[in-house]
Amino acid sequence: MKYVIKNGSVVFCDGVKRCDILVEDGKIARLAENIDADCEVLDAEGLHVFPGLIDMHVHLREPGFEGKEDIASGSRAAVAGGFTQVCCMPNTNPVCDNAVVVTYIKYRAEQVGLCKVHPIGSITKGEKGDELAEIGKMAEAGAVAISDDGRSVMDSKIMRLAMEYAHGFNLKCLCHCEDENLVDGGVVNEGLNSTITGLKGSIRAAEDIMIAREIALSESLDIPVHICHVSTYSGVEIIRSAKARGVKVTAESCPHYFWLTDDVITGFNTFTKVNPPIREERDRLAVIEGLKDGTLDCIVTDHAPHSSKDKEVEYSLAAFGISGIETSFSLSYTKLVKEGNFSLSELADRMSAAPARILGLEGGEIREGGVADLTIADLAAKYVIDGEKFLSKGKNTPFNGQEVYGRIAYTIVDGAVKYSAN
Ligand code: DOR
Ligand code: ZN
């Protein structure tokens, strides 16, 4: 397999250059201004070539919840969204708390053969919070991290043991931060809009307390930790000050936290219901600032597909989650680069290089000799988001009707074109 990607604007970590890319045997064989090789050409005139996007926080729902999504539909949605690698959370049925489920997910993803799928094992058996899962065996089977995502590990001693044990296998804990007692059944942000709607609120402190606890453990033990989907301005500040004194903490946030405020809940659209909840303008701006200055290392989707029966119920009963993998790139490009002050290199860092760094994955940059995982986008193309058109089984997006820029043209994994818009 050999071809040249010609005339594209290539997004490197230190800027954008017009440059041709020779792809050979799944690798980037050469980068040069003008490559005249005797082989096929992929014309990228007018397009931007990014390092393959990596989403380190998705829910693919298989095994067990295939009505919401499965590895095949989730992989199709991922490559349509420009993602070459995804890491899938363990809140499946059975929970991915042992090597057999890790092995099954990897096997199934290889059969599907679209994007690379890296399983995340659970921290505790059944994500129940009281007994450590088979962390070592899952590491050997290929899990890239551990997480009880969807909930916090409430017992601090269990969390400490998990961090120490996982560190021995070079795995990080990815922490969903919400104190369950303080959340107390809250479904939206606690504030003016929870009062107006009568929906039960969840206070920022519920998230912040757990962020602070994970940082305290990480600092005391000198073990790296990663904070999932940060939604509060105060959480961003806790992470910023921890980083300033050298704590090995990394963190992520999602497009819905830097696009939306809880004003959206007043329409009672259950597609706006997500965990942690969408908060206020102050939080939204802090998430953007955190992503800009690197306090928040990366953008993830928390792609959480749900079926219509999970969402077409009253707000307080609806499932938490947003189907996000097909809109993440255009939402991020539009808000952060087109309307904001991010460079394309910064966008590529937050959506590709940073997750690769955090989890030690191959890829994340465009360089000679590197893997040919590439995402080619038409940044001038404008379209209106319509969840009904998603390839994901989850049509649950709060962005229906939103006009955005940046359409994925090609997604290339190990040199093979796995998605093409036309
Ligand atoms: O909104 C959410 N949905 N947040 C999570 O942490 C879990 C996810 C899910 O699994 O649906
Ligand atoms: Zn979560």
Image (cartoon, helix red, strand yellow):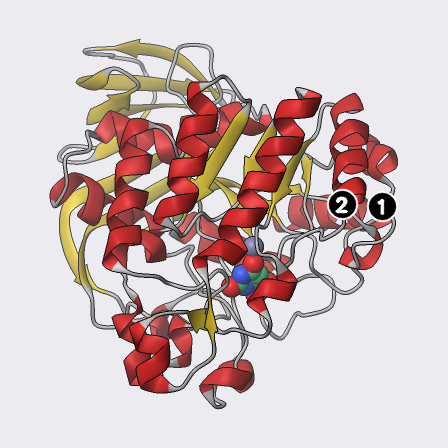
Q: For the residue carrying disc 2, how many other residues have a C-alpha within 10 Å: few (<14), some (14-19), or many (20+)? A: many
| Left or right, residue 383 beside residue 239 | left
Which residue is depicted at the point 50% across and 90% down?
313
x then y, percent, for residue 405: 17, 51
The answer to whether any part of residue 207 appears in the image is: yes
| Nearer to the camera, 419 or 158 | 158
Which residue is depicted at the point 37% across and 77% down?
194
Query: Which residue carries the number 2 mark?
Result: 123
Three-letter code, disc 2:
Ile
| Left or right, residue 191 beside residue 392 | left
Q: Are marks 1 and 2 in contact (CB under 8 Å)?
A: yes
Beta carbon at label 2 within 8 Å of ligand 2: no
When the figure is inspected, residue 188 is found, relative to residue 2, above or below; the finding is below
Upstream in sequence: badge 1 or badge 2? 2
x then y, percent, for residue 279: 35, 61
Question: Mark 1 falls on what kind of element?
Answer: loop
- Give ligand 2's quarter of the image: bottom right
x then y, percent, for residue 72: 59, 58
| Nearer to the camera, 26 or 62 | 62
Give me the disc on residue 161: none
When the figure is inspected, residue 361 is found, relative to residue 410, above or below; the finding is above
Query: Which residue carries the number 1 mark?
Result: 133
Q: Quadrant of residue 358?
A: top right
Three-letter code, disc 1:
Ala
